[in-house]
Image: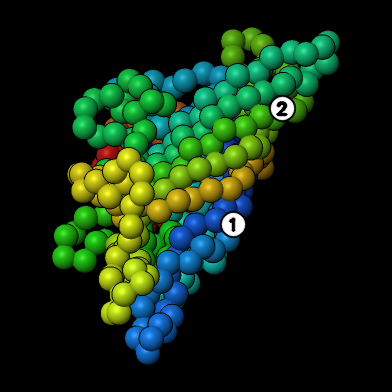
Amino acid sequence: MKKLILMAAAVALVGGAFAADIYDYKASVKYVDFKKVKINKATYNVKTVKSTTLTGYLVTPIQCPCTQAIAVTGLDPAFLIVVNKNSTGKMKNTGVKDPKVLPANLLTKVWAANSSKTLEAQGYLFAGVMDQGSANYVTIPSSAYDFGDNTTQESQYLWSIWNDVEPGSGTFVETWLTHAGFGKGTTDPAKDAGCRKGTAHECLVSLAGSVVGGAFTCEPNEYLWTGGNPPTLGETFLCQGWNETDVNQTYLMDVVSGTWSIKGNTKIKPATLTAAEQALQVNLADAKALEELGNLKAAGQKLYKDYTLTLVEATFAAKWF
Protein backbone atom coordinates (compact mmCIF):
# COMPACT_ATOMS: atom_id res chain seq x y z
CA MET A 1 0.00 0.00 0.00
CA LYS A 2 2.84 2.37 0.87
CA LYS A 3 4.41 1.87 -2.55
CA LEU A 4 1.06 2.50 -4.26
CA ILE A 5 0.70 5.78 -2.36
CA LEU A 6 4.22 6.78 -3.34
CA MET A 7 3.52 5.96 -6.97
CA ALA A 8 0.39 8.10 -6.93
CA ALA A 9 2.43 10.97 -5.51
CA ALA A 10 4.99 10.49 -8.25
CA VAL A 11 2.30 10.72 -10.92
CA ALA A 12 0.97 13.89 -9.30
CA LEU A 13 4.44 15.43 -9.52
CA VAL A 14 4.51 14.94 -13.27
CA GLY A 15 1.53 17.18 -13.88
CA GLY A 16 3.09 20.14 -12.10
CA ALA A 17 6.55 20.00 -13.62
CA PHE A 18 7.53 20.63 -17.22
CA ALA A 19 11.22 19.86 -16.76
CA ALA A 20 12.31 16.58 -18.31
CA ASP A 21 14.83 14.23 -16.81
CA ILE A 22 15.40 12.10 -19.92
CA TYR A 23 17.98 12.66 -22.64
CA ASP A 24 18.20 11.06 -26.07
CA TYR A 25 21.52 9.18 -26.20
CA LYS A 26 23.61 8.11 -29.18
CA ALA A 27 27.15 6.78 -29.41
CA SER A 28 29.01 5.82 -32.59
CA VAL A 29 31.80 3.50 -31.54
CA LYS A 30 34.29 0.86 -32.58
CA TYR A 31 34.56 -2.31 -30.51
CA VAL A 32 36.05 -5.82 -30.69
CA ASP A 33 34.12 -8.81 -32.01
CA PHE A 34 35.20 -12.20 -33.43
CA LYS A 35 35.15 -13.76 -36.86
CA LYS A 36 36.12 -17.24 -38.06
CA VAL A 37 39.19 -17.38 -40.34
CA LYS A 38 41.17 -20.22 -41.89
CA ILE A 39 44.94 -20.15 -41.46
CA ASN A 40 47.10 -23.05 -42.63
CA LYS A 41 43.96 -25.19 -43.08
CA ALA A 42 42.86 -24.63 -39.47
CA THR A 43 39.90 -22.50 -38.35
CA TYR A 44 40.30 -19.88 -35.63
CA ASN A 45 38.08 -17.31 -33.92
CA VAL A 46 40.02 -14.12 -34.51
CA LYS A 47 39.28 -10.72 -33.02
CA THR A 48 38.11 -8.06 -35.44
CA VAL A 49 37.30 -4.36 -35.01
CA LYS A 50 33.69 -3.47 -35.84
CA SER A 51 31.69 -0.25 -35.87
CA THR A 52 28.24 0.18 -34.40
CA THR A 53 25.80 2.69 -32.95
CA LEU A 54 24.38 2.51 -29.45
CA THR A 55 21.00 4.22 -29.20
CA GLY A 56 18.84 4.84 -26.19
CA TYR A 57 18.21 7.23 -23.34
CA LEU A 58 19.89 8.66 -20.27
CA VAL A 59 17.41 8.72 -17.38
CA THR A 60 18.53 11.02 -14.57
CA PRO A 61 17.21 11.50 -11.03
CA ILE A 62 14.26 13.89 -10.86
CA GLN A 63 15.36 17.53 -11.19
CA CYS A 64 18.88 16.36 -12.01
CA PRO A 65 21.64 17.25 -12.89
CA CYS A 66 21.10 20.62 -11.19
CA THR A 67 19.82 19.07 -7.97
CA GLN A 68 21.20 15.77 -6.72
CA ALA A 69 18.46 13.55 -5.30
CA ILE A 70 19.30 11.77 -2.08
CA ALA A 71 17.82 8.40 -1.11
CA VAL A 72 18.20 6.37 2.03
CA THR A 73 21.21 4.53 0.58
CA GLY A 74 23.08 7.61 -0.75
CA LEU A 75 23.14 9.19 -4.19
CA ASP A 76 20.50 8.01 -6.62
CA PRO A 77 22.06 6.65 -9.80
CA ALA A 78 21.09 7.77 -13.24
CA PHE A 79 20.44 4.99 -15.77
CA LEU A 80 21.76 4.63 -19.31
CA ILE A 81 19.42 2.31 -21.25
CA VAL A 82 20.72 1.31 -24.69
CA VAL A 83 20.49 -1.19 -27.53
CA ASN A 84 23.06 -2.23 -30.10
CA LYS A 85 21.05 -3.28 -33.15
CA ASN A 86 24.20 -4.54 -34.88
CA SER A 87 25.05 -6.93 -32.07
CA THR A 88 25.80 -10.53 -33.00
CA GLY A 89 24.68 -11.50 -29.52
CA LYS A 90 21.30 -12.69 -28.33
CA MET A 91 19.50 -9.45 -29.10
CA LYS A 92 19.87 -10.25 -32.80
CA ASN A 93 20.33 -14.01 -32.96
CA THR A 94 17.48 -15.14 -30.73
CA GLY A 95 15.16 -12.15 -30.81
CA VAL A 96 15.73 -11.20 -27.18
CA LYS A 97 15.68 -7.45 -27.69
CA ASP A 98 15.42 -6.25 -24.11
CA PRO A 99 17.52 -3.08 -23.76
CA LYS A 100 20.55 -3.12 -21.51
CA VAL A 101 20.68 -0.86 -18.44
CA LEU A 102 23.87 0.61 -16.99
CA PRO A 103 24.06 2.65 -13.76
CA ALA A 104 25.28 6.14 -14.62
CA ASN A 105 26.37 9.45 -13.16
CA LEU A 106 26.06 12.74 -15.06
CA LEU A 107 28.35 15.58 -13.93
CA THR A 108 27.63 18.94 -15.59
CA LYS A 109 28.61 22.58 -15.30
CA VAL A 110 27.05 25.54 -17.15
CA TRP A 111 28.12 29.18 -17.41
CA ALA A 112 27.05 32.40 -19.11
CA ALA A 113 29.30 33.77 -21.86
CA ASN A 114 27.04 36.79 -22.57
CA SER A 115 23.59 38.17 -21.75
CA SER A 116 21.84 35.45 -23.74
CA LYS A 117 19.69 32.85 -22.02
CA THR A 118 21.82 30.21 -23.77
CA LEU A 119 24.59 28.86 -21.54
CA GLU A 120 27.82 27.05 -22.34
CA ALA A 121 28.01 23.56 -20.85
CA GLN A 122 30.59 20.89 -20.11
CA GLY A 123 30.21 17.50 -18.54
CA TYR A 124 31.19 13.93 -17.85
CA LEU A 125 28.94 10.90 -18.10
CA PHE A 126 30.15 7.79 -16.30
CA ALA A 127 28.24 4.60 -17.13
CA GLY A 128 28.84 1.03 -16.08
CA VAL A 129 29.30 -0.72 -12.77
CA MET A 130 31.09 1.13 -10.00
CA ASP A 131 33.75 -0.30 -7.72
CA GLN A 132 31.88 -2.54 -5.29
CA GLY A 133 34.90 -3.19 -3.07
CA SER A 134 33.73 -0.62 -0.52
CA ALA A 135 30.88 1.75 0.26
CA ASN A 136 32.50 4.38 -1.97
CA TYR A 137 29.96 3.77 -4.70
CA VAL A 138 27.42 5.86 -2.77
CA THR A 139 29.83 8.61 -1.71
CA ILE A 140 32.29 9.03 -4.60
CA PRO A 141 30.22 8.28 -7.68
CA SER A 142 32.67 9.68 -10.23
CA SER A 143 36.07 8.44 -9.10
CA ALA A 144 35.01 4.93 -8.03
CA TYR A 145 34.36 3.62 -11.54
CA ASP A 146 36.71 0.88 -12.69
CA PHE A 147 36.46 -2.14 -15.02
CA GLY A 148 33.26 -3.24 -13.29
CA ASP A 149 32.41 -6.07 -10.95
CA ASN A 150 31.36 -9.69 -11.36
CA THR A 151 28.02 -9.75 -9.55
CA THR A 152 25.58 -8.64 -12.28
CA GLN A 153 25.08 -9.49 -15.96
CA GLU A 154 22.82 -6.70 -17.20
CA SER A 155 25.04 -5.76 -20.17
CA GLN A 156 25.53 -9.38 -21.27
CA TYR A 157 25.32 -9.74 -25.09
CA LEU A 158 25.26 -5.97 -25.60
CA TRP A 159 28.28 -6.19 -27.88
CA SER A 160 28.24 -9.69 -29.33
CA ILE A 161 27.67 -13.38 -28.66
CA TRP A 162 31.17 -13.31 -27.10
CA ASN A 163 30.13 -10.67 -24.55
CA ASP A 164 29.25 -13.56 -22.24
CA VAL A 165 30.21 -15.40 -19.08
CA GLU A 166 33.76 -16.76 -19.19
CA PRO A 167 33.54 -20.53 -19.87
CA GLY A 168 34.04 -22.62 -16.77
CA SER A 169 34.27 -19.68 -14.38
CA GLY A 170 30.80 -18.20 -14.08
CA THR A 171 32.48 -14.77 -14.21
CA PHE A 172 31.04 -11.81 -16.09
CA VAL A 173 32.23 -8.20 -16.05
CA GLU A 174 29.88 -5.37 -16.97
CA THR A 175 30.55 -2.96 -19.81
CA TRP A 176 31.83 0.48 -18.78
CA LEU A 177 31.73 3.75 -20.73
CA THR A 178 33.38 7.05 -19.76
CA HIS A 179 32.17 10.12 -21.67
CA ALA A 180 33.34 13.73 -21.79
CA GLY A 181 31.94 16.57 -23.85
CA PHE A 182 30.73 20.10 -24.34
CA GLY A 183 27.32 21.50 -25.18
CA LYS A 184 24.62 23.96 -24.27
CA GLY A 185 22.45 24.86 -21.34
CA THR A 186 19.66 27.38 -20.88
CA THR A 187 18.04 29.68 -18.35
CA ASP A 188 14.91 29.99 -20.49
CA PRO A 189 11.93 28.26 -18.79
CA ALA A 190 10.31 27.70 -22.20
CA LYS A 191 13.30 25.56 -23.21
CA ASP A 192 13.79 23.84 -19.90
CA ALA A 193 15.33 20.50 -20.88
CA GLY A 194 16.80 19.28 -17.65
CA CYS A 195 16.01 20.53 -14.18
CA ARG A 196 15.37 23.43 -11.86
CA LYS A 197 17.58 24.86 -9.15
CA GLY A 198 15.74 26.99 -6.63
CA THR A 199 13.64 29.65 -8.37
CA ALA A 200 16.06 30.02 -11.31
CA HIS A 201 16.26 27.78 -14.33
CA GLU A 202 19.73 26.50 -15.10
CA CYS A 203 19.28 23.50 -17.33
CA LEU A 204 21.34 21.18 -19.47
CA VAL A 205 20.14 21.00 -23.08
CA SER A 206 22.88 18.97 -24.78
CA LEU A 207 26.38 17.52 -24.58
CA ALA A 208 28.55 15.86 -27.22
CA GLY A 209 32.12 14.59 -27.25
CA SER A 210 34.30 11.49 -26.99
CA VAL A 211 33.79 8.17 -25.21
CA VAL A 212 36.15 5.38 -24.20
CA GLY A 213 35.17 2.14 -22.56
CA GLY A 214 35.61 -1.57 -22.17
CA ALA A 215 33.65 -4.62 -23.31
CA PHE A 216 34.12 -8.01 -21.68
CA THR A 217 34.75 -10.90 -24.06
CA CYS A 218 34.59 -14.42 -22.71
CA GLU A 219 37.59 -15.73 -24.70
CA PRO A 220 40.92 -14.38 -25.96
CA ASN A 221 41.97 -14.31 -29.59
CA GLU A 222 42.62 -17.90 -30.75
CA TYR A 223 45.47 -17.25 -33.18
CA LEU A 224 48.82 -15.64 -32.44
CA TRP A 225 51.40 -15.61 -35.23
CA THR A 226 54.81 -16.42 -33.78
CA GLY A 227 56.68 -17.32 -36.94
CA GLY A 228 56.54 -20.94 -35.92
CA ASN A 229 54.47 -23.90 -37.02
CA PRO A 230 52.02 -24.67 -35.55
CA PRO A 231 51.08 -21.21 -34.21
CA THR A 232 50.71 -20.40 -30.52
CA LEU A 233 47.15 -19.72 -29.38
CA GLY A 234 46.26 -16.64 -27.37
CA GLU A 235 47.19 -12.97 -27.16
CA THR A 236 50.34 -10.99 -26.39
CA PHE A 237 50.18 -8.16 -23.87
CA LEU A 238 52.81 -5.47 -24.33
CA CYS A 239 52.35 -2.87 -21.62
CA GLN A 240 51.66 -2.59 -17.90
CA GLY A 241 49.86 -5.77 -17.00
CA TRP A 242 46.71 -5.75 -19.12
CA ASN A 243 46.75 -9.54 -18.69
CA GLU A 244 46.63 -9.23 -14.92
CA THR A 245 44.30 -11.98 -13.69
CA ASP A 246 42.68 -9.95 -10.93
CA VAL A 247 39.12 -10.11 -9.62
CA ASN A 248 37.89 -7.91 -12.47
CA GLN A 249 39.24 -10.16 -15.26
CA THR A 250 40.87 -7.18 -17.03
CA TYR A 251 42.73 -9.47 -19.41
CA LEU A 252 39.41 -10.27 -21.12
CA MET A 253 38.40 -6.60 -21.46
CA ASP A 254 38.58 -5.06 -24.95
CA VAL A 255 38.50 -1.46 -26.11
CA VAL A 256 35.44 0.65 -26.96
CA SER A 257 36.11 4.06 -28.49
CA GLY A 258 34.12 6.70 -30.35
CA THR A 259 31.81 9.70 -30.06
CA TRP A 260 28.58 10.35 -28.15
CA SER A 261 25.83 12.89 -27.62
CA ILE A 262 22.80 13.56 -25.43
CA LYS A 263 19.91 15.95 -26.00
CA GLY A 264 17.06 16.76 -23.65
CA ASN A 265 13.77 14.97 -24.33
CA THR A 266 10.62 16.53 -22.84
CA LYS A 267 8.14 14.28 -24.67
CA ILE A 268 8.58 11.01 -22.79
CA LYS A 269 6.36 10.78 -19.71
CA PRO A 270 6.74 8.29 -16.82
CA ALA A 271 5.07 4.92 -17.34
CA THR A 272 2.96 3.34 -14.62
CA LEU A 273 4.77 0.59 -12.75
CA THR A 274 3.10 -2.77 -12.25
CA ALA A 275 3.03 -4.43 -8.84
CA ALA A 276 5.89 -6.71 -9.94
CA GLU A 277 7.96 -3.74 -11.04
CA GLN A 278 7.28 -1.87 -7.82
CA ALA A 279 8.43 -4.97 -5.93
CA LEU A 280 11.89 -4.48 -7.49
CA GLN A 281 12.16 -1.05 -5.87
CA VAL A 282 14.25 -1.71 -2.79
CA ASN A 283 16.72 1.18 -2.46
CA LEU A 284 15.04 4.32 -3.79
CA ALA A 285 12.35 4.82 -1.20
CA ASP A 286 10.53 7.98 -2.25
CA ALA A 287 8.06 9.23 -4.85
CA LYS A 288 10.69 10.89 -7.01
CA ALA A 289 12.67 7.67 -7.16
CA LEU A 290 9.57 5.80 -8.31
CA GLU A 291 9.00 8.47 -10.94
CA GLU A 292 12.57 7.95 -12.14
CA LEU A 293 11.90 4.22 -12.56
CA GLY A 294 8.72 5.14 -14.42
CA ASN A 295 10.90 7.20 -16.75
CA LEU A 296 13.25 4.23 -17.17
CA LYS A 297 10.34 1.96 -18.12
CA ALA A 298 8.95 4.52 -20.58
CA ALA A 299 12.37 4.95 -22.20
CA GLY A 300 12.74 1.19 -22.47
CA GLN A 301 9.39 0.92 -24.23
CA LYS A 302 10.60 3.40 -26.84
CA LEU A 303 13.36 0.91 -27.65
CA TYR A 304 11.33 -2.30 -27.31
CA LYS A 305 7.54 -2.13 -27.07
CA ASP A 306 7.23 -5.05 -24.63
CA TYR A 307 9.89 -3.75 -22.25
CA THR A 308 9.23 -3.94 -18.51
CA LEU A 309 11.54 -3.49 -15.56
CA THR A 310 11.12 -7.19 -14.78
CA LEU A 311 13.45 -7.85 -17.73
CA VAL A 312 16.30 -6.29 -15.74
CA GLU A 313 18.68 -8.91 -14.36
CA ALA A 314 17.66 -9.65 -10.77
CA THR A 315 20.99 -9.01 -9.06
CA PHE A 316 21.33 -5.69 -10.87
CA ALA A 317 17.83 -4.62 -9.83
CA ALA A 318 18.55 -5.51 -6.20
CA LYS A 319 21.71 -3.42 -6.23
CA TRP A 320 20.55 -0.33 -8.15
CA PHE A 321 16.77 -0.11 -7.76
Residue hosting label 2: 184
Q: Which mark is residue 251?
A: none
Q: Quadrant of the N terminus?
A: top left
User: Disc 2 residue type?
Assistant: Lys
Against 88, residue 18 (above or below) is above
Q: Position of residue 112 (x, y in %)?
A: 74, 13
Contact between labelled residues 1 and 2, with CB atoms less than 8 Å apart: no
Q: Position of residue 315 (x, y in %)?
A: 25, 48
At mark 1, the secondary structure is strand
**Hey, which residue is sitting farthest front in the picture?**
227
Q: Earlier in the sequence, mark 2 or mark 1?
A: 1
Residue hosting label 1: 53
At mark 2, the secondary structure is strand
Residue 246: in sight, yes or no?
Answer: yes
Please state if 148 lies on the left or on the right of 271 as rendered: left
Q: Nearer the viewer, residue 26 or 189?
A: 26
Picture residue at 65% right of the left edge, 18% below the top: 110
Q: Position of residue 94 (x, y in %)?
A: 41, 75
